Amino acid sequence: MRLEVKEIRKSFGEKEVLHGVSFQVDSGSALGLLGRNGAGKTTTIRILMDVFHADSGEICLDGRKFVPSKQQIGYLPEERGLYPKRTVMDQMLYLAALRGMRSPDAKKSAEKWLARLEVSEYASRKLETLSKGNQQKVQLAATLVCDPEIVILDEPFSGLDPVNSQILKDVVNELIAGGKLVIFSSHQMSYVEEFCDNIAVIDHGQVVLAGELKEIKKEYGKNRLMLAAENYSLEQLAEKTEREWSNLVSVSGRKKEFLILELKEGADRRGFMEKLVESDVTVEKFGRYEPSLNDIFVSKVGEEE
Ligand SMILES: Nc1ncnc2c1ncn2[C@@H]1O[C@H](COP(=O)(O)OP(=O)(O)OP(=O)(O)O)[C@@H](O)[C@H]1O
C-alpha cells in the first residue's frame, strides 16, 4: 500500500497552519514525521485520521481517496485516550469490538499484545492504578489490538524507561518487518534514525526536507570532514585551521572529540589532507563526517525567525 498526502492546507480561523504539506509512505516502511513544537505534525496526523478536514489537498491510498474508517488503523494519539476507571482488559476488548473484531479473536489479540508489551499482569487492574510507563504500554497494546495495516504513533516513547523503550523499538521493527505502514512522529531523533527509512521535516506548516534518510545524510555529509589531533586541543586546532587553511576549509561545528570542517568550493579532501601531512599536526582522527539526524534537523529548522 502507498499512502500519499498531497498539498494539504489547513487554517484555524485566519491563521493558515499547514501550507501545502505533501509526503508519502509505503507498506513495510516507516516515515519519520519531524518538526519543532507547533510545526504542524499533529494537525497533519489529525487530518489523516479525519479528526479535522483539510481546506484543500488530498490524501490517497493506492491512488484512491483515503477513508480512515474503511481501514484498520492503529493510532496512538499524543494525548492518550483510554478510560482510567476501567480495567485494562475491558478496554482492550471494547476497542477491539469497536474495530469490528469478534469476541474470541479480540480476546486472543488483546492477550497477545499485552504479553508482547509485558503488561499481562495488569490485565484486570484499573488503568489509573498503573504507572505512567505501563499505561503507555497498555495504550500501545490498545493501538495494535485490531492488527492494523496502518500504524500512526505520535510520540510513542514519552514516559518509557530504557528497557521499555527497547521493547517498543523491537515492536516497531517487527511491525515494519511485518509489512505495516508506519508513520512515526517524535522529537527523539535517535529513535527516528533507528527505524525510519524516510523522513519528512515540517517547519511552520511546510515540508522543508523530505526523502530517504540515507540520501539526505549523504548529501549533508558530502563536503564535511572530521578532524582531531594528538598535539592540539580542539580550540587550538580550530584557530590553526582558520589561520592557515581558510582557503580550503571552514570550521562548521564541534563535537566532543573532533572538529567538523566544511570544504570550501573548489577544495577537495585530498588537497586538504596534503596540507595536513605537511603541517606539524599529528592527526588523531580524520575522515568524512556523517551527520546525525539531529545535526540535519537543527541546521534545517533550528534558526529562530
Ligand atoms: N484546534 C486548533 N485551533 C487553533 N489552532 C490550532 C489548533 N490545533 C493546532 N493549532 C495550531 O496549529 C499549529 C500547529 O500545531 P500542531 O499541534 O499541529 O503542532 P505539532 O507540530 O504537533 O507540535 P508539537 O511538537 O508541539 O506537538 C500551532 O500553531 C497550533 O497553535
Image (cartoon, rainbow, N blue to C red):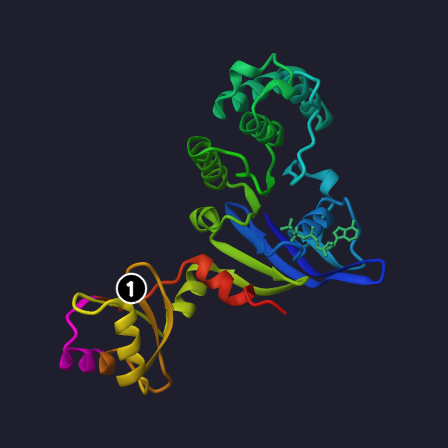
Image quadrant containing the C terminus: bottom right
| Type of the residue with mark 1 | Phe
Residue at horizontal 56 percent and vertical 44 percent from the top: 181
Residue 75: quadrant of the picture: top right
- In the image, is residue 274 part of the stretch drawn in magenta? yes
Q: Position of residue 291 (x, y in %)?
A: 39, 62
Task: Relative to 133, say whether 254 is above or below.
Answer: below
Residue at horizontal 29 percent and vertical 84 percent from the top: 243
Q: Position of residue 74 (x, y in %)?
A: 63, 36
Residue that sits furthest to the right in the current view:
13
- The answer to whether residue 64 is left or right of residue 294 is right
Q: Is mark 1 within 8 Å of ligand 1?
A: no
Q: Nearer the viewer, residue 193 or 35?
A: 35
Residue that sits furthest to the top in the current view:
124
- The answer to whether residue 15 is left or right of residue 153 is right
Q: Nearer the viewer, residue 177 or 152?
A: 152
Looking at the image, can residue 245 be seen? no
Residue at horizontal 50 percent and vertical 26 percent from the top: 117
Task: Relative to 266, say whether 302 is above or below.
Answer: above
Q: Position of residue 41 (x, y in %)?
A: 65, 52
- In the image, is residue 245 part of the stretch drawn in magenta? no
Task: Assign a secondary structure to mark 1.
Answer: loop
Residue under label 1 = 258
Label 1: few (<14), some or many (≥20) within 10 Å?
Answer: many
In the image, which residues are magenta? 273-284
- The answer to whether residue 209 is left or right of residue 163 is right
Q: Position of residue 229 (x, y in %)?
A: 20, 68
Looking at the image, can residue 23 be seen? yes
Residue 20: quadrant of the picture: bottom right
Task: Relative to 180, say whether 211 is above or below.
Answer: below
Residue at horizontal 50 percent and vertical 62 percent from the top: 298
